[in-house]
Amino acid sequence: MMKRLQAAAVAALLGIFALGFGAPSVKAEPYWQCVTFARMFSGIDIYGDAHTWWTQAQGKFATGERPRTGAVLAFQSNGRMRLGHVAVVSEVLTDRVIRVTHANWGGSRGKVEENVTVVDVSDANDWSAVKVWYNPINDLGTTVYPTHGFIYNSPDRPSEGLLLAAASSSVGQP
């Protein structure tokens, strides 16, 4: 009789733990993709793989070759990074050095890395080629990554000069 009561008690406890009652709750950390993180962190409402962001931004968001805090640096598809990459500028240090916050990069699969140094190594100083800090070697990585440029969280509008030229050419016309 005692063995049956012990077996019933063990079965009841196993059932309770299986339902989640009494067992400590372990929450898994989210697995971040770069695009999901960049969209949420920058407010730039673009969907799809990172390599499509630059094309999708055209005509919808302002784009350029100068870093600004909050802008998204769009990496081109290349080698092992066939889907591209996007990273949010967290700080502009100099005209050739910025810090980005991004997700799912290199050795930090699914994780967010904050304030990672990125250096413009392009010949034209136009951010078309960069190197990214790599923690395991405590230095800039050896890979040069091609980029499209920066997507700014503002609507794409003609520049002020174009607006003035259009306005002056229409003066005196019906």
Image (cartoon, helix red, strand yellow):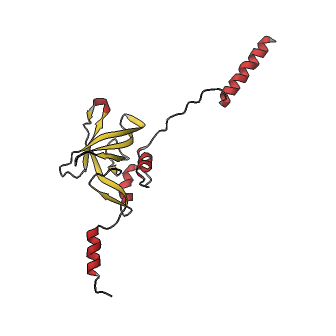
As drawn, 159 above or below 70: below
Tell me the residue at 29%/82% (across/down): 170
As drawn, 140 above or below 148: above
Q: Which residue is situated farthest in the bottom direction here?
A: 174
Q: Measuring from the top left, give residue 6's x and y in whole percent.
A: 75, 15
Tell me the residue at 39%/35% (across/down): 108
Q: Which residue is situated farthest in the right direction here?
A: 1
Q: Measuring from the top left, give residue 135's x and y in whole percent.
A: 31, 32
As drawn, 118 above or below 170: above
Q: Which quadrant, please, contains the C terminus? A: bottom left
- Of 82 and 40, the residue lying toward us: 40
Q: Quick check: 48 left or right of 99?
A: right
Tell me the residue at 59%/30% (across/down): 25
As drawn, 32 above or below 155: above
Q: Which quadrant, please, contains the N terminus? A: top right
Q: Which residue is situated farthest in the top direction here?
A: 2
Q: Measuring from the top left, give residue 33's x and y in whole percent.
A: 43, 43
Tell me the residue at 26%/39% (across/down): 143
Q: Measuring from the top left, give residue 104's x and y in whole percent.
A: 40, 40
